[in-house]
């Protein structure tokens, strides 16, 4: 893949120290002129390029720290920025490789020299629209992690209407799960146990929070995701013949439970359960404890329930088993 960086009109000034490090381009999602400018700016999501200049080594100039291209990329570090722009960032060769393997399209790819050296650029030719080089200190301003990998990709947020997910296959519901690590681990377990649909309630952590994405280890690229309020989830479940089963203390012991074929499996907040997110459920299930300890971690509890469900309905062939039995 040819690295199609463009010349930043302020890059030279930046290199000469004419900009103060604290004078960064800012992006306020509440100011709509920023969003509107994306479609018209030289460095926009639409991929328009006005000018470019190659170096003697065939590599385009680095994007400067104050390049206008980077303002919206920096905004992806915030929930408001992600929601406004409809995009999120992934970092590192592992997640990038998972995205490419799943056939997901990379809108923009930002690399440091070190990050570029570790990638098979030819492999990315059909999966990345535009690729830019940035300096290490610029990547540090874009990255969410303490030690950036030198690889950052911009992806479109893909969500589906809740009704489209309810086609007979099981759905994991993150009902008020607030911890990003738990949410990501639940998505990862869901995929492992054959559940490829997940719905986040409006009170749960954001599905594309960077920590959720990292903890899910690529599940975002293969799962179908939706966002809905608790009342809408329960209403849709009734209309589509689903039953809502929630993990809860004091519920029916798991060994006594036969899960329904059309399942919305709700995992809630570790302290409050699903009560704050779902107005009602059809069945509450508890995992018996034989030792001490207050409770199981939400991700562990949800994973155990998903494992038992997968064993009741055909193990690895869960999707076809449940849809055929609907």
Image: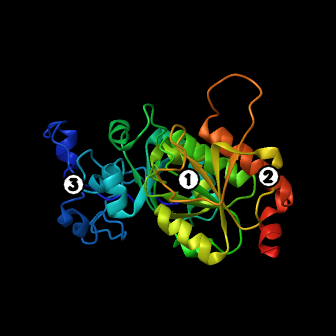
Q: In which quarter of the view is residue 13 placed?
A: top left
Which of discs 3 and 2 lies nearer the camera? The answer is: 2
Q: Distance between the residues labelled 3 and 2?
A: 50 Å
Q: Distance between the residues labelled 1 and 3?
A: 29 Å
- Quick one: label 2, few (<14), some, or many (20+) residues within 10 Å? some
Tell me which label, 3 or 2, sits earlier in the chain.
Answer: 3
223 sits to left or right of 318: left
Quadrant of the frame with the C terminus: bottom right
Tell me which label, 1 or 3, sits earlier in the chain.
Answer: 3
Q: How far apart are marks 2 and 1 (CA)?
A: 21 Å
Q: Is residue 314 above or below residue 168?
A: above
Classify mark 2: helix, strand or loop. Answer: loop
Q: Which residue lies at the image location 30% right of the left edge and 52% below the top edge?
A: 70
Q: Which residue position holds label 2?
A: 257
- Identify which residue, 149 or 237, lies in the foreground: 237
Q: Position of residue 133 (x, y in %)?
A: 40, 49
Q: Position of residue 284 (x, y in %)?
A: 66, 51
Q: Which residue position holds label 3?
A: 28
Q: Is residue 259 above or below residue 271?
A: below
Q: Where is residue 231 in the image (x, y as percent from the top left)?
A: 48, 65
Q: Which residue position holds label 1?
A: 174
Classify mark 3: helix, strand or loop. Answer: loop
Q: Which residue lies at the image location 61% right of the left edge and 35% below the top edge?
A: 297
């Amino acid at each position: 893949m040819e690295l199609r960086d463009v010349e930043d009109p302020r890059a030279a000034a930046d290199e000469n120290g004419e900009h103060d490090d604290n004078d960064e381009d800012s992006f306020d999602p509440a100011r709509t002129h920023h969003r509107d400018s994306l479609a018209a700016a030289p460095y926009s999501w639409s991929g328009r390029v006005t000018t470019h200049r190659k170096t003697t080594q065939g590599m385009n100039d680095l994007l400067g720290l104050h390049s206008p291209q980077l303002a919206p990329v920096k905004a992806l570090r915030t929930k408001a920025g992600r929601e406004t722009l409809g995009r999120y960032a992934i970092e590192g060769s592992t997640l990038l490789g998972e995205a490419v393997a799943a056939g997901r399209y990379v809108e923009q790819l930002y690399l440091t020299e070190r990050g570029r050296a570790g990638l098979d650029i030819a492999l990315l030719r059909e999966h990345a629209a535009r690729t830019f080089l940035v300096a290490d200190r610029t990547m540090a301003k874009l990255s969410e992690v303490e030690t950036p990998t030198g690889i950052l990709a911009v992806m479109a947020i893909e969500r589906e209407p809740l009704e489209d997910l309810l086609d007979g296959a099981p759905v994991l519901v993150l009902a008020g799960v607030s911890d990003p690590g738990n949410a990501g681990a639940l998505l990862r377990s869901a995929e492992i146990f054959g559940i490829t649909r997940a719905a986040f309630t409006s009170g749960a952590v954001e599905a594309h929070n960077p920590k959720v994405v990292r903890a899910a280890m690529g599940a975002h690229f293969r799962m179908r995701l939706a966002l809905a309020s608790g009342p809408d989830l329960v209403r849709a479940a009734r209309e589509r013949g689903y039953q809502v089963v929630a993990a809860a203390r004091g519920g029916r012991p798991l060994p006594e439970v036969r899960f329904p074929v059309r399942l919305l499996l709700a995992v809630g907040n570790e302290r409050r359960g699903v009560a704050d997110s779902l107005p009602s459920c059809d069945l509450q299930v508890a995992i018996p404890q034989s030792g001490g300890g207050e409770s199981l971690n939400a991700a562990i509890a949800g994973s155990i329930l998903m494992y038992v469900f997968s064993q009741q309905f055909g193990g690895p062939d869960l999707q076809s088993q449940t849809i055929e039995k609907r």
